[in-house]
Image (tube, helix red, strand yellow):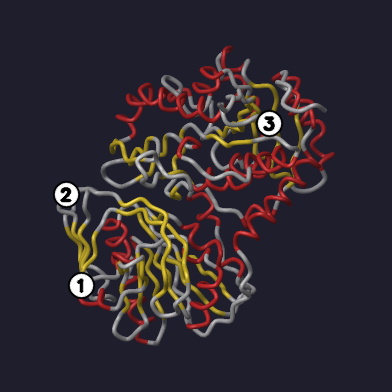
Amino acid sequence: MIQKRKAKSIMIQGTGSDVGKTVLVAGLCRLATRKGLSVLPFKPQNMSNNAAVADIPLDDGGGGEVARAQWLQALACHRLSHVDMNPVLLKPQSDLGSQIIVHGKLWKTANGRDYQSLKPHLMNAVMESYRRLCEQADLVIVEGAGSPAELNLRVGDIANMGFATKANVPVILVGDIDRGGVIASLVGTHTILSNMDRKMVCGYLINKFRGDLSVFDKGIDHISELTGWPCFGIIPWFSGANNLPAEDSFALERASSNQNGTVIVIVPVLSRISNFDDLDPLKLEPHLRLVFVRPGDLWPKGARLVILLGSKSTISDLEQFKALGWERNLHNHVRQGGYVLGLCGGYQMMGRSVKDPYRIEGVQKEAKGLGLLDVDTVLIPNKVVLNTKAIDVTTKKSIEGYEIHMGSTRGPDRKRPMILIGNKTDGAISQNGLCRGCYLHGLFSSDDWRRSYLLSLGIESKGQSYRNSLNSTLDELADFLELWIDAKIWEMNEILPV
């Protein structure tokens, strides 16, 4: 019989969203793993439309959803991702609020107000997952969500101090100096927290510093004097973070074109865009210039490819696409010989119509598609969640990816499928060969397929390994954090001998 372990734990919380918690946890996971510990990541509640299918199947053999951030953190630990690493996942939708994924499966859909009343019932699911992880590791590194200072969300909280106090996990608070006001954010958080929550904080980190660190010496003195918390380090800006999958749309809002590339690839940015980490492997291709087109932006001329990404609300994003006048731009692009690739929701938009008879996404039951593919999509309640191995029909290259969708697509262009999954086909290719799409996410991570697909468009590919690139960046991040974080961080509950 295998003896169960009881892991030590630390929790990284932030003074706000996008302070760098996800990257810090990933780096700490890789650092502690390299020190010989068995490490697992954990995020009680995540809100993100960048989801993955967990590497370890559910007990019923099906696939379970987990936030891409926890998938990355599992990779940092050299472990397979599991839904216990992210027991509650919120996926913002449109009129109906957010999908609530519990232990990898769709539980229900609720708006923000209704979700607040559901949170106390979700604490049991959170604690079940946490206890199971603690039995499998020496150390569990926990990531908070948003800020613990959001007092309106404190009752029934499962994401920050509600979990920390329930599980008795010490907290390190992270402030982002790059956005300004870091002293006020840390001291303000200290002031707002209750005495019980305040006692859970063992110290703080200053993240994303640019310039001479000594300039902030007096800032550290002020924060420590006003809070009594020790500083565990000032962490300079880590540029390699851009090479890691982003957790939420904050990163996409800051995404900019790769000015070094000569081949233009347009990516329209819509309100409910999802799984935009599909693009990450393209960052390895120096010849590509990814141009993220937002509402109000002009489409650049001479693009070779347009990629339509997934969506948590296909009809809503489709209507926005047309209202912005982008349909005309897209058809002009194709008439001039440009290529279009649609992934999941983007594939659905490329057809003749998208129908929602069960009102899964909202009140609108049907929308006219972009007409690039002779197919029609019907959204259905049954959600497909699975990791998938496929073969590209054109290049015969193997692809590994995943499916997360609620829809069935049929039509004449399906007779020209894009990929084969076992003895089944998926996707469609237009008669002129310029437009194609499928339900498979993550396909650019398959290096051989990415190379061959780009070459078929006349684009030279460097062919670097995406997985190797991720691991290399995680190693660099671990080295970086070890240099800048005080070793006392491991002494809080005797995690490591120092």
Q: Secondary structure at mark 1?
A: loop
In percent of the image, x 20 and y 59: which residue is there? 378
Q: Quadrant of the N terminus?
A: top right
Instruction: Report the mark closest to the observer, 1 or 2.
Output: 1
| Whole-percent x, y for residue 317 in the image | 32, 58
- Residue contact between numbered discs 1 and 2, judged by CB atoms under 8 Å: no
Instruction: Report the mark closest to the observer, 3 or 2.
Output: 2
Instruction: Report the mark closest to the observer, 3 or 1.
Output: 1
Mark 2 Cα within 10 Å, few/some/many (few <14, many 20+)? few
| Whole-percent x, y for residue 83 in the image | 45, 39
Distance CA(mark 3)–CA(mark 1): 59 Å
Mark 3 Cα within 10 Å, few/some/many (few <14, many 20+)? some
**Residue marked by disc 1:** 411
In percent of the image, x 62 and y 18: which residue is there? 200
Q: Earlier in the sequence, mark 3 or mark 2?
A: 3
Q: Quadrant of the C terminus?
A: top right
Q: Amino acid at mark 1?
A: Gly
**Residue marked by disc 3:** 183
**Residue marked by disc 2:** 358
In percent of the image, x 45 and y 25: which residue is there? 128
Mark 1 Cα within 10 Å, few/some/many (few <14, many 20+)? some
